[in-house]
Amino acid sequence: MIRNRVSNPDGDFDSAEINLSPLIDCVFILLIFYIVTTVFIEETGVEVNKPEAAASTQLDKKSLLIAITAENNVVYAGTEIGISGVAGIVKRQMEIAEIPVIIQADERADHGVFSRVYGEAKAAGATKVNFATEY
């Protein structure tokens, strides 16, 4: 007969236990690793219907996103900044790191607003200014 328990000299039986502490430690270390290495994509905070383009390229995920809504509102990080606020935000970001600026303009937005936002970004020191399209 096979016994699953270890017999003591007193005649009592003790059950074997599995120590789960190292397993829990390992799971927490993996969780911390995944949290630290996750790339968070910053969105503009508004829904924009982008125009279609015949040719497009994939842009860098680390970029400064500025949106222009159908009502010609200029939005950054969910806050309306207006055309005059573009230069300050772009200049501040370019002092930290030189990353591309992506303008997400709604297909119904005025071209004049888009061109003024583009000009403000260039004047603030952005070397790469792109616009987002559907592909």
Image (spheres, helix red, strand yellow):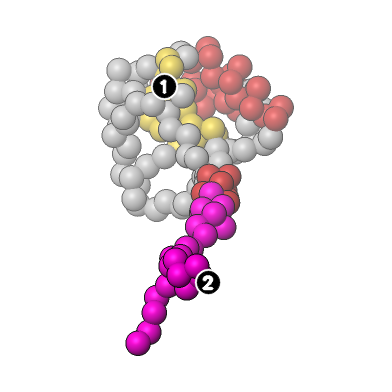
Q: Is residue 103 visible?
A: no
Give the image location of residue 36, x and y in percent: 58, 45
Left or right: residue 58 compared with residue 48: right
Q: Quadrant of the N terminus?
A: bottom left
Q: Which residues are magenta?
A: 1-28
Left or right: residue 124 compared with residue 81: right
Mark with earlier residue (1, 2): 2
Secondary element under disc 1, as helix, strand or loop, is: loop
Who's the residue at 39% across and 75% down the image? 4
Give the image location of residue 92, x and y in percent: 65, 22
| Residue 36 position (above or below residue 127) | below
Q: According to the image, label 1 marks what residue?
A: 78
Q: According to the image, label 2 marks what residue?
A: 9
Give the image location of residue 71, x and y in percent: 30, 17
| Residue 94 position (above or below residue 89) | below
Amino acid on which disc 2 is placed: Pro
| Residue 133 position (above or below residue 95) | below
Disc 1 to disc 2: CB gap under 8 Å: no
Who's the residue at 71% across and 27% down the image? 95
